[in-house]
Image (cartoon, rainbow, N blue to C red):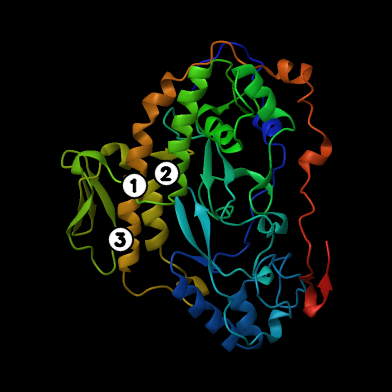
Amino acid sequence: MPDVTPDDAPLLADLMPWSVAPPRLGRGWPAAPDAAALKARWDALVKAEGPDREALFAPTRSRTLASAVTQLPGQSSGTGRLARESGPCPEPVRILAAPFDEQWLIPDHRLIDAARPELWRVADERQIFVVEQTAAPEASSGPVLLASPVLPLSPPHGPRVGRVRPLYRRPGGREPNLAPGLPEYVGERLGTAPVDPVDVLGWILVAARPGPNRVEVPLPTDPEAWSHGVELGRRTLWLMRRDGDRPKLPGGRRPYVRSPLPSRPVEVVYDRDEETLLVDEGRISPVPSEAWDFRVGGVRVLEEWFGRRTEQAEPGTLEAVRPTTWPQTWTSELLELITVLALLAELGPGRAELTVDRPITAADLREAGVLPVPESARRPASVLDHHEEGPEGQFTLL
């Protein structure tokens, strides 16, 4: 976390002004680590009739089998009432179910209490979602912000997440969600051309800190500090997005499965002396202690990731429809997650050494006319040039 003396650091809420609460499911069964399990859950739902279908669905005040809602933007799910649905399961999509935990979701608006359609409209291969994390009293509570290439959800259990801030307000990487004039002003103070929006995001990821009430982001005027922070931020962003080449630990310290994981693992334990993850009788090593100790919001990421795949579900519910044995894909995802967390932990000293001696203050941004941002910058852009299907097959145009 960068060292800065003045207390007038700009707020993240002003630097990235458009934010949305994370989507909230209202029921656990439409999301899962396994896509095939979701399709089996859907099949069980549509085969059930009357009270049995209602019980499986788990209605809330926001969603029942009779709810009439619009189609999710960019998806092809139905809009008829679920009480008479008999069609196939909409193709599951990747979502961020919890910090560093990509799972699958049935993208059907009828299943989701608060879907936040404005986020779905801008979700594409260029988008990066920034998610505020709940602060924890522990010094090792983890990063203040996470970045994700897929839409993040509000987790049903564990630490709550804060607002979601897309990097772009429009699909295709158009119109950065930054205070108007911010890239030009920062570039002017640094003595360079207007800075790239992804570089601004990289700096924000490594410089953000909890303030008295909101997340603060010190901004530098020193080109060397900026370059160092952006380099760390770009690396952080690459690891959090996990796109392109698979990350590898240096020196051949890639984690391997030394003893096969059981078909139905129950417990995960870490042997610090041996740098080994013990999954019942299964063994994975080497696992750096920094990966095991990596926390977000005070919660150990690896332990929670494992727990979400092994926790018991109530018999007779759709959550109980899940793989009968531990899939090989989960082992591959676990090995990659260990690597990512270890590499992110290695960036910690670099972030700690990041200093901002002559910062750009919020007062500077106000004097330059960058702040306050116009109210329109805090609202979603109108992005539609086509119809979206409304309830019962009707069409709407935004």
> Which residue is nearer to you in this view: 157 or 339?
339
Q: Position of residue 369 (x, y in %)?
A: 79, 22
Query: Which amino acid type corresponds to the residue marked 1 in the rendered image?
Result: Pro
- At horizontal 73% and vertical 80% (from top left) the residue drawn is 81
Quick check: 66 above or below 193?
Answer: below
Which residue matches tag 1?
247
| SS type, badge 3 | helix
**Residue on which the image places disc 3:** 331
CB-based contact (under 8 Å), mark 2 and mark 1:
yes
Classify residue 325 as left or right of residue 166: left
Mark 1 closeness class: few <14, some 14–19, many ≥20 residues within 10 Å: some
Alpha-carbon neighbours of circle 3 within 10 Å: few (<14), some, or many (≥20)? some
From the top left corner, tell me how far across and down residue 115 is, in percent: 68, 60
324 versus 43 height, above or below: above
Q: Is residue 328 visible?
A: yes
Sort mark 2 into few (<14), some (14-19) or many (20+) by Cα contacts within 10 Å. many
* Residue 174 appears left or right of 231: right
Q: Which residue is mark 2?
A: 239
SS type, badge 1 = loop
Looking at marks 3 and 1 on the same chain, the residue that comes earlier in the sequence is marked by 1
Of residue 381 and residue 282, the one placed in the foreground of this image is: 381
Q: Residue drawn 63% across and 14% down?
A: 7
What amino acid does circle 2 point to? Answer: Leu
Q: Which residue is the extreme one toward the front?
A: 193
